């Protein structure tokens, strides 16, 4: 008797992918998710190792936004990668993921003007220009506070930022990561330079798109001194208005970046296709698909079917899932089985402890 062929629900999602220097067993990627679970000094702990190891069946885990340098905390209990204790803590995470056969990149990050003085020993935050976030508040141990006006980085202060990212890339290697993702999204420092709502500089880091992208490009080039290009990804979110971000021409910015990043032969370009708040609505994916020659990972609001279709028809390399991965440690297996998904509990997104972090049930538990 011929063996019965098993029907694959999502054959493209489960086709292996060469992503720069690594090969992924599937294209269901875990998006970076800040969960604020460190207990002291921004040091990753055993609970975080358990959380990430639970999700090791992802094609690739992109670990949460991690402070590249001291004094840039935006979430109080987010991890860092600037101290030996943090490197050691992350090593337990990467070891746990690797032991389960997974692969994991670290998202290296600076919050810029989101770094409130109450979280950083009174230190004033820095940004491209002295423009504060408006209409949103930051959670601190002193309660919710308004964001403060940042100090516009002087030209002679910028090299320290680039050096900080480079050291974070070195430390990520020491911590056993498979690569790094440079966080150029969501209204944090590199994005604050990219977009003209937050960057009103008149020097070589402001004005034209090439000037506004200069800091991101310099960070990429510094990271290339540390990691081979096939182990570096970049994330952008040209439409996201989170952190009171805006740009006069997100399509032009996206097209310019997609074209420019071809020069670096990176592992991937990771694009958030829409706006958390639905305020800025334009098609930024088409310019990326048109201009970018390497692997494109897209994210925001995908389910398995749409992801499958986008890989099959649009030519995306893979899709990253945020909230679905947060609530479903075995998301790829669930997609393969056509199983129901757990529903995420937003009340525990940033709270301490295991609740809403390591206790989402597996399919067969
Ligand atoms: C709790 C939470 C934390 C997040 N943390 C990060 C982060 O650290 N870095 C980042 O680039 N995006 C972060 N995001 C955005 C997600 O990576 C993702 O873009 C978003 O959830 C949309 O994808 P989805 O529709 O698949 O959930 C976060 C989102 C959530 C809900």
Image (cartoon, helix red, strand yellow):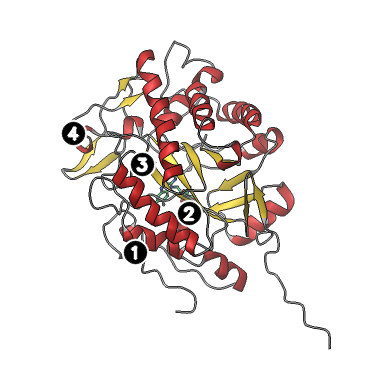
What residue would you read off at disc 1? Answer: 356
Toward which corner of the image does residue 307 lie, by quadrant? bottom right
Residue 345, can we see it?
Answer: yes
* Position above or below: 14 against 245: below
Instruction: Measure the alpha-carbon separation of dots 3 and 2.
Output: 22 Å
Residue ranking furthest to the top: 203
Q: Secondary structure at mark 1?
A: loop
Ligand 1 within 8 Å, label 3 CB: no
Q: Secondary structure at mark 4?
A: loop
Instruction: Measure the alpha-carbon separation of dots 1 and 3.
Output: 24 Å
Label disc, if present, on residue 322 of the rendered structure: 2
Q: Secondary structure at mark 2?
A: loop
Residue ranking furthest to the bottom: 1
What residue would you read off at disc 4? Answer: 121
Give whichever of discs 3 and 4 has the lower sequence position.
Answer: 3
Q: Along the line of sight, which residue is nearer the eye, 307 or 261? A: 261
Instruction: Measure the alpha-carbon separation of dots 3 and 4.
Output: 18 Å
Q: Along the line of sight, which residue is nearer the eye, 23 or 294? A: 23
Instruction: Measure the alpha-carbon separation of dots 2 and 4.
Output: 31 Å
Instruction: Measure the alpha-carbon separation of dots 1 and 2.
Output: 14 Å
Give whichever of discs 1 and 2 has the lower sequence position.
Answer: 2
Toward which corner of the image does residue 155 lie, by quadrant? top left
What residue would you read off at disc 3? Answer: 81
Give whichever of discs 1 and 4 has the lower sequence position.
Answer: 4
């Amino acid at each position: 008797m011929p063996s019965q062929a098993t029907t694959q629900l999502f054959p493209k999602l489960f086709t292996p992918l060469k992503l720069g220097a690594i090969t992924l067993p599937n294209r269901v990627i875990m998006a970076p998710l800040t969960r604020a679970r460190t207990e002291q000094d921004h040091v990753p702990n055993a609970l975080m190792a358990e959380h990430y190891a639970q999700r090791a069946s992802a094609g690739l885990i992109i670990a949460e936004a991690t402070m590249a340098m001291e004094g840039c905390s935006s979430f109080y209990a987010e991890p860092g990668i600037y101290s030996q204790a943090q490197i050691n803590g992350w090593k337990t995470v990467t070891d746990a993921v690797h032991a389960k056969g997974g692969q994991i990149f670290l998202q290296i990050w600076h919050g810029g003007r989101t770094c409130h003085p109450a979280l950083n020993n009174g230190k004033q935050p820095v940004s491209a220009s002295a423009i504060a976030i408006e209409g949103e508040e930051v959670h601190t141990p002193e309660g919710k506070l308004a964001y403060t006006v940042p100090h516009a980085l002087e030209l002679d202060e910028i090299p320290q930022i680039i050096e900080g990212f480079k050291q974070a890339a070195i430390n990520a290697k020491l911590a056993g990561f498979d690569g790094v993702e440079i966080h150029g999204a969501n209204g944090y420092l590199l994005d604050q330079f990219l977009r003209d709502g937050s960057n009103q500089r008149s020097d070589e880091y402001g004005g034209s798109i090439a000037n506004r992208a200069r800091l991101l490009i310099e960070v990429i080039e510094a990271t290339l001194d540390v990691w081979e290009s096939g182990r570096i990804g970049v994330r952008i979110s040209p439409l996201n208005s989170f952190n009171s971000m805006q740009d006069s021409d997100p399509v032009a910015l996206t097209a310019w970046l997609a074209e420019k990043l071809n020069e670096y032969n990176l592992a991937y370009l990771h694009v958030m296709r829409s706006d958390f708040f639905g305020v800025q609505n334009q098609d930024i994916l088409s310019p990326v698909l048109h201009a970018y020659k390497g692997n494109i990972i897209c994210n925001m609001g995908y389910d398995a079917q749409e992801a499958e279709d986008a890989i099959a028809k649009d030519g995306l390399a893979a899709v990253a899932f945020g909230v679905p991965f947060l609530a479903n440690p075995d998301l790829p297996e669930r997609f393969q089985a056509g199983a129901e998904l757990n529903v995420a509990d937003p009340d525990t997104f940033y709270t301490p402890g295991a609740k809403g972090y390591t206790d989402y049930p597996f399919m067969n538990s």
